[in-house]
Image (spheres, rainbow, N blue to C red):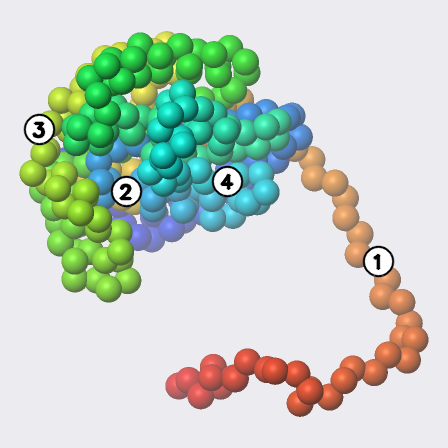
C-alpha cells in the first residue's frame, strides 16, 4: 500500500485541481452541458468529504448536491427512478449525487427495504435509464469509494468520540458493520449489471482520504473535454458623488456583540 499523502503535498495539489474544477464549471455553463457525478460506496468511505472539496469553490447556482432523504409514502408509489430524474441538471448545470438511485442495489436490497421483484426490476432498468441519459447528451460519471473493513471501523470509532461528527453515525451505519459480506455481495452484483460501456463504474481506493480526493478529482477532469472559457471583462463603475445621505446612528440598530475583540 502506498504511504499516506502528506498534508503539504495534498493542500498544494487539491488547490490546483479545484482551480481546474472552476474552469470545468465555466465550460459547462458556457457550452450548456449537463454533468452528473454519482458518489457511491460504503458508509464512512469518504464520499462526503470529497464532495465538499469538489464544490468548495464552485458556484452553487451551477453545481449543486443532491442528497435525497428516504422516500415519502407518495414517492414509494412512483416509478423508482422518478424522484432521481427530477434532480437531473438542465443545460449549464452540474449535479453531484451524494448517494443516488443505487440505494436500491445496496442498502435497500441488503436490509430488505425492497422486494426481490423490485430489486430484479432495478437491475434490469438501471442500465436502460443510464443509457437514455447518455444518449440524450448527459455527461454521466459514477464513482465507487472503496474502504477496507478495518479502516471503516476506525472511522466509525473516531466519530463516536467526536461530538462535531457524531451526527454522521446512524443506526444503519452501525448495522452495516455486521453485514460487511452482504454489502460486498450486493456491490458485486450491482457492478455485474450496471458497469456498462456507456456509463462505467470507476473505483476509488479511499483508505487514504487525501489520496482518494486527489485521484477522483483528477480522473473526473481527465474524462471531460472541457477547456478554459475566456471570462467576460468586468470594469468596476465609478462611485457617484454623495447626494447628502446620512446614515442613522449605529445605536439605533440591533447589533451583533463583538465577542471577537475579546479573543486572545
The reply to whether residue 188 is visible in this rendering is yes
Q: Reading the chain from its start, which is encountered first: label 2 or label 1?
A: 2
Question: Spatial distance from mark 3 to mark 2, Cα to Cα?
Answer: 20 Å
In the figure, 156 relative to 140: above or below?
A: below
Camera-side mark, 1 or 4: 4
Q: Which part of the image, by quadrant, shows the N terminus? A: top left
How far across and down, in percent of the image, does residue 51 sit?
A: 39, 42
What residue is shown at x 20% (from left), y 17% (from top)? Answer: 116
In this rendered view, identify the residue nearer to me: 124 or 224: 124
Tag 2 and tag 4, C-beta contact below 8 Å: no
Tag 1 and tag 4, C-beta contact below 8 Å: no
Q: Which residue position is annotated with label 4?
A: 64
Q: Which residue position is annotated with label 1?
A: 237
Q: Reading the chain from its start, which is encountered first: label 3 or label 4?
A: 4
How far across and down, in percent of the image, does residue 198 sit?
A: 41, 11
Q: Which part of the image, by quadrant, shows the C terminus? A: bottom left
Q: Reading the chain from its start, which is encountered first: label 3 or label 1?
A: 3
Q: Which residue position is annotated with label 3?
A: 181
Using the image, tell me which numbered label, if any, was put on residue 46.
2
What residue is shown at x 56% (from left), y 35% (from top)? Answer: 25
Amino acid at each position: 500500500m502506498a504511504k499516506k499523502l502528506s498534508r503539504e503535498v495534498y493542500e498544494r495539489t487539491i488547490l490546483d485541481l479545484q482551480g481546474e474544477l472552476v474552469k470545468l464549471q465555466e465550460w459547462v455553463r458556457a457550452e450548456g452541458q449537463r454533468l452528473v457525478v454519482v458518489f457511491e460506496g460504503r458508509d464512512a468511505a469518504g464520499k462526503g468529504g470529497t464532495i465538499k472539496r469538489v464544490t468548495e469553490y464552485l458556484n452553487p447556482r451551477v453545481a449543486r448536491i443532491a442528497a435525497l432523504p428516504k422516500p415519502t409514502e407518495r414517492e414509494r408509489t412512483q416509478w423508482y427512478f422518478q424522484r432521481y430524474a427530477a434532480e437531473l441538471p438542465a443545460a449549464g448545470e452540474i449535479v453531484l449525487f451524494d448517494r443516488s438511485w443505487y440505494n436500491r442495489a445496496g442498502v435497500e436490497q441488503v436490509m430488505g427495504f425492497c422486494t426481490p421483484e423490485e430489486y430484479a426490476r432495478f437491475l434490469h432498468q438501471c442500465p436502460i435509464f443510464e443509457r437514455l441519459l447518455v444518449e440524450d447528451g448527459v455527461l454521466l460519471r459514477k464513482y465507487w469509494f472503496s474502504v477496507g473493513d478495518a479502516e471503516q471501523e476506525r472511522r466509525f470509532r473516531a466519530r463516536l468520540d467526536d461530538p462535531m461528527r457524531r451526527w454522521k453515525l446512524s443506526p444503519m451505519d452501525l448495522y452495516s458493520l455486521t453485514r460487511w459480506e452482504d454489502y460486498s455481495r450486493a456491490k458485486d452484483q450491482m457492478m455485474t449489471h450496471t458497469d456498462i460501456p456507456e456509463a462505467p463504474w470507476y473505483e476509488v481506493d479511499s483508505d487514504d482520504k487525501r489520496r482518494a480526493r486527489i485521484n477522483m478529482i483528477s480522473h473526473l477532469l481527465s474524462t471531460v473535454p472541457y477547456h478554459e472559457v475566456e471570462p467576460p471583462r468586468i470594469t468596476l463603475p465609478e462611485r457617484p458623488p454623495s447626494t447628502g445621505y446620512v446614515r442613522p446612528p449605529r445605536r439605533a440598530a440591533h447589533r451583533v456583540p463583538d465577542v471577537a475583540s475579546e479573543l486572545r
